[in-house]
Image (cartoon, rainbow, N blue to C red):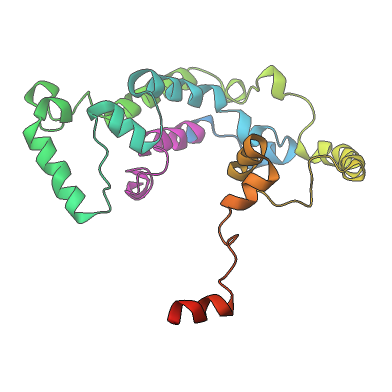
């Protein structure tokens, strides 16, 4: 699972690899069989949620985030782009120059044994898994109260009727393609303000303007 580290393949933009790996392990131990998933679609995403939330809560308590860039910045006030060769050199220089912040090279942290996110993530996952192993398999599959009841397959026919009514009413502007960022601008500045900021909204110079500039 080395490709999970560094916010997914060292890009820094994804979830910390320690959180992702802990989620993999917890889900494996919860171990909902395929036959159970076919009967109850809710089990597909809900059974391990409380346990994974425990790991996420611990990360947010210690590091203030679960995404790689913010975890690294909050821990050492640095977040280098690990895909940039020069930044990689700067990171290693920082690790040697400020050992107490880095942790990996600090004697008091025993080579990062307890201070770094991968180590702590593994420990928190192990704590959660130990609690799971004390339960019977059926207990691990127990759903939270608000997720019990109809599964996705049972809900789809009922929701389809609602969807048709919403389309008829024009709710949510279903035909309008707009990003969340643009939606925010629309709310703050109105349609005219949004159109002014959109890329490609500037008209190309007219032919006579080109002629004037050449002269």
| Residue 15 among those drawn in magenta | yes
| Residue 195 pos. (x, y %) | 64, 51
Q: Is residue 148 left or right of residue 166?
A: left
Q: Residue at x 60, y 28 (%)?
A: 47
Tell me the residue at 55%/34% (across/down).
31
Q: Position of residue 25 (x, y in %)?
A: 43, 34
Q: Is residue 127 found left or right of 179 in the rendered image? A: left
The vertical placement of 8 against 132, above or below, is below
Q: Which quadrant holds the C terminus?
A: bottom left
Of 161 and 85, nearer the camera is 85
Assess whether residue 97 is covered by the magenta stretch.
no
Residue drawn at (33%, 43%), measured in percent from left and top?
A: 5
- Quarter holding residue 181: top right
The range drawn in magenta is 1-27
Residue 204 x, y percent position in the rendering: 57, 70
Near-viewer residue (97 or 194): 194
On the question of residue 200 being in view, the answer is yes
Residue 37 on image: x %, y %: 68, 38
């Amino acid at each position: 699972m080395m490709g999970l580290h560094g916010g997914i393949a060292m890009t820094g933009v994804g979830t910390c690899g320690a959180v992702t790996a802990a989620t993999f392990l917890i889900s494996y131990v919860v171990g909902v069989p395929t036959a159970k998933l076919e009967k109850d679609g809710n089990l597909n995403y809900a059974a391990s949620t409380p346990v994974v939330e425990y790991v996420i809560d611990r990360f947010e308590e210690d590091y203030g985030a679960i995404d790689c860039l913010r975890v690294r910045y909050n821990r050492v006030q640095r977040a280098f782009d690990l895909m940039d060769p020069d930044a990689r050199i700067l990171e290693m220089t920082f690790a040697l120059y400020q050992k107490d912040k880095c942790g990996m090279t600090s004697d008091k942290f025993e080579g990062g044994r307890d201070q770094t996110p991968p180590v702590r993530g593994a420990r928190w996952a192990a704590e959660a898994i130990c609690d799971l192993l004390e339960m019977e398999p059926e207990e691990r599959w127990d759903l939270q109260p608000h997720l019990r009841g109809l599964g996705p397959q049972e809900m789809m026919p009922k929701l389809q009727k609602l969807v048709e009514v919403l389309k008829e009413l024009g709710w949510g502007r279903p035909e309008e393609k707009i990003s969340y960022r643009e939606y925010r601008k629309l709310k703050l500045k109105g349609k005219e303000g949004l159109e002014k900021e959109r890329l490609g909204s500037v008209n190309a110079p007219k032919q006579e303007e080109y002629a004037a500039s050449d002269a």
